Amino acid sequence: MAACLRQGIPVVCGSTGWLERWDEAGALTEELGGSLFYASNYSVGVNLFFHFNEYIATKMHQFGGYDVAVREIHHTQKLDAPSGTAVTAAEGILAHFPAKTSWRNAPAEGPAELAIISERTADVVGTHVVTYTSDVDTLVLSHEAHSRAGFAQGALLAAEWLPGRPGVFGMKELLGL
């Protein structure tokens, strides 16, 4: 990434293995006047899912009485668990649902924990489900990818959008969210 930025090449990245160096990458991008675009998931549908997830978390917290959990299902070759998409969904909930203060990739051990349940099943591209449950009802927000084409389409949109825009960007900027 640094080599591209030093050569003035805009960077579109979706891998999660380097995020502990996020601040360093952002600082280098700013220092060089470069362009960096990062998303944990490039699907337009997933990014709308993230947006609505945060909105729903705010509303559900305001009215109280609900617990929330995240479930993600992927193909058996997916190595990370939880997925970056599930983590992004969980972080969106934590930012807007103050009753939850942390997440864990297992059933919650207390009311302040947000459970992420990871499942690996053959022939599943990717499914993410956020479920709010109370004594009186259940609300479910979900996104199911039918193919990987949506990820490629979003990455191509980002690559077309980024040149000539110095700074650090993500899908919120691209989609106007």
Image (cartoon, rainbow, N blue to C red):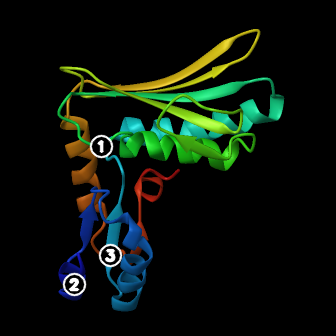
- Residue indicated by mark 2: 8
Tell me the CA gap for discs 3 and 2: 8 Å
Question: Callout 3: few (<14), some (14-19), or many (20+) C-alpha neighbours within 10 Å?
Answer: many
Q: Is residue 146 left or right of residue 140?
A: left
Question: Callout 1: few (<14), some (14-19), or many (20+) C-alpha neighbours within 10 Å?
Answer: few
| Circle 1: element type | loop
Q: Which label sits in the foreground, 3 or 1?
A: 1
Relative depth, front residue between 105 and 91: 105
Q: Which residue: 32% across, 75% down?
A: 35
Relative depth, front residue between 134 and 49: 134
Relative depth, front residue between 127 and 175: 127
Tell me the CA gap for discs 3 and 1: 27 Å
| Residue 33 pos. (x, y %) | 36, 87
| Circle 2: element type | loop
- Residue indicated by mark 1: 80
Q: Quadrant of residue 114?
A: top right
| Residue 102 pos. (x, y %) | 61, 46
The amino acid beneath tag 1 is Asp
| Residue 110 pos. (x, y %) | 68, 33
- Residue indicated by mark 3: 35
Any mark on residue 161, and which? none
Q: Which residue: 46% across, 45% down?
A: 87
Q: Quadrant of residue 107?
A: top right
Q: Which residue: 30% across, 62% down?
A: 161
Sequence-earlier tag: 3 or 1: 3
Relative depth, front residue between 159 and 12: 12
